[in-house]
Image (tube, rainbow, N blue to C red):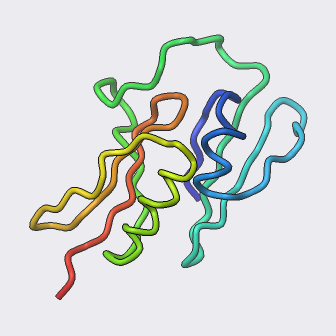
Amino acid sequence: MPRVEVSDRGFDSHRQPCFGGEKFDPVEHFHHTVFALGGGTLFGLHTHTTNSGGTHPFSELNLGLDHIAFACTQSELEDWVARLDEAGIEHSGIKHAHYGSGISFRDPDNIALEFFAPPTG
């Protein structure tokens, strides 16, 4: 299960409407949220109450994570556009390329996220 460290901001306004899921009370020193995304995929978010205090937003230009992509079908991309629009989350719209199609957006910590569908046929 992929897990990403995030700030606590944006859960109610951004992450919950996008993925659903449930936020749990702190377990010792962190909040833990798990989203069941279908196909047996789980995606976990942690917010540590004792972190390094870093205030720099995420940038895919730094070493480490570039972005997280969630697999879907071509037909599901339209559903994701509607769901993101309904939640008021800015996104790229569906972009098509020879290797597939995707929708890019960012979470409140500026982490780059994507719904990606391989080409049909």
Asked where in the image residue 4 lies, by quadrant, the reply is top right
State whether residue 56 is above or below residue 74.
Answer: above
27 relative position to 23: left or right: right
Asked where in the image residue 10 lies, by quadrant, the reply is top right
10 relative position to 97: left or right: right
Residue lying furthest left in this view?
98
> Horizontal and vertical percent for residue 75?
36, 78
The residue closer to the viewer here, 88 or 8, is 88
> Horizontal and vertical percent for residue 3?
59, 47
Numbered marks: total: 0
Image quadrant holding the C terminus, namely bottom left
State whether residue 33 is above or below residue 52.
Answer: below
Asked where in the image residue 102 lies, by quadrant, the reply is bottom left
State whether residue 12 is above or below residue 9.
Answer: below
89 relative position to 71: left or right: right
Residue lying at 21% horizontally and 83% vertically, measured from the top left = 120
Residue lying furthest bottom in this view?
121
> Horizontal and vertical percent for residue 70?
43, 61
Residue lying at 31% horizontally and 70% vertically, measured from the top left = 117
> Horizontal and vertical percent for residue 106?
44, 38
The residue closer to the viewer here, 91 or 8, is 91
Image quadrant holding the N terminus, namely bottom right
Residue lying at 65% horizontally and 14% vertically, measured from the top left = 52
Residue lying at 20% horizontally and 76% vertically, measured from the top left = 119
